[in-house]
Image: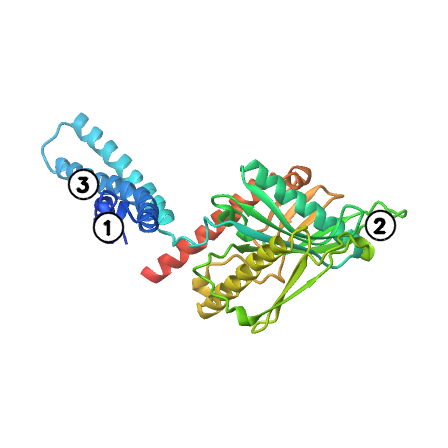
Amino acid sequence: MFENLEVFQEKYKELEKQLIDVNVINNSELFQKVSIEYANLGPIVEKYKEYKSTKENIEDLKKMLQEKLDDEMKELVKEELKEDEDKVSEIEEELKILLVPKDPNDNRNVIVEIRAGVGGDEAALFAGVLFRQYTRYAERNGWKVDVMSTNEIGIGGYKEVVFMIEGKGAYSKLKFESGVHRVQRVPETESGGRIHTSTATVAVLPEAEDVEVEINPQDIQIDVFRASGNGGQCVNTTDSAVRLTHIPTGIVISMQDEKSQLRNKEKAMKILKTKLYDMKIQEQNKELSAEKKNQIGTGDRSERIRTYNYPQGRVTDHRIGLTSHKIDAINDGELDELIDALTQYSQAKKIENMDKELN
């Protein structure tokens, strides 16, 4: 597996030359592409150099053992040999992780959609909890949050909220959050103290770039109307709200949060492009074998992935069987324990599949 890494070293040298090539430097798009590829290959090449150096040292030590050595020297050589052999095993595991195929969307911004599911107002209130949870997580990572569309119920909950999180690595961290989230708690309006179960769905979509999604203007029907608030109350006296209908797919995006019709149209178009890009990704995933998908669970957004149990103060992720008793901290955006465990599980599955393919 690791003997073939010379090709990475050669590629790394080639990219290094390109980075000082005037033609590449003067082409900002190409320079950025080469820089990213160079940065991604760096850790692999450095780890491979360490691997080769340690392997060479092992061979030298084995040759030394074949020579006439006094007992004390022989023991020292054996001890160093054992240390290097253990070190090679560690490096091999590190290399496996570095060689796990990177998701090309990992560094993208994301558009997150949270919708109340089963449970009426309690589900909408839970959607509000999840919205705050993810915005707090974004704040902890220094990411920017841009609320794109909301449908509030007036008591702090949301039938639907759509927002963008802008920040390096946002998708890599949040991509496992897509699915059905379940809450078990006693609503404030429940006089009998009975526990209610409600749900909310979360969809995390990597933001599409213009070059990836081409939309024919003739495929879009644009309707404008007056924005309204809760209960149909008119909040705008001009036709600023926008509804985009993508005729080939039937996708409908309505946007009314901004006072400007142009701004609402821009936001609606951004969401439409992202949804079309996501459809493209889903189609590509269907073409892959189940083994090569390397997804946690089924990847289906209708799958129940997590339960928040308030009476017991616990959060359980059903995909990896992890339970945390820090529900308040998690709701305040301290998601690293869950996200790190999901990431490690995903990497382990990918490494397992790599080993199967090699064997």
The location of residue 165, given as percent across then percent down, is 56, 46
Query: Circle 1 sits on which residue?
Result: 11
The location of residue 190, given as percent across then percent down, is 87, 48
Q: Which is more N-terminal, label 1 or label 2? A: 1
Disc number placed over residue 56 in the picture, else none: 3
- What residue is at 44 percent from the left and 67 percent from the top? 288
- Quick one: SS at disc 1? helix
The answer to whether any part of residue 299 appears in the image is no
Name the outermost residue toward the front.
238
Mark 3 crowd level (few <14, some 14–19, many ≥20, 10 Å Cα): few
Mark 2 crowd level (few <14, some 14–19, many ≥20, 10 Å Cα): few
Disc 3 marks a residue whose amino acid type is: Glu
Q: Which circle, 3 or 2, is nearer the viewer?
A: 2
Q: State whether residue 87 is above or below residue 124.
A: above
Q: State whether residue 4 is above or below residue 20.
A: below
Q: How many marks?
A: 3
Name the outermost residue toward the top.
72
Query: Circle 2 sits on which residue?
Result: 194
Front residue (pair 256, 275) = 256
Disc 2 marks a residue whose amino acid type is: Arg
Q: Quadrant of residue 312?
A: top right
Name the outermost residue toward the left.
68
- Quick one: SS at disc 3? helix
Mark 1 crowd level (few <14, some 14–19, many ≥20, 10 Å Cα): some
Quadrant of the image for the C terminus?
bottom left
Quadrant of the image for the N terminus?
bottom left
Q: Which is more N-terminal, label 2 or label 3? A: 3
The location of residue 68, given as percent across then percent down, is 9, 32
Front residue (pair 329, 124) = 124
Disc 1 marks a residue whose amino acid type is: Lys
Distance from the alpha carbon under mark 2 to that under mark 1: 63 Å
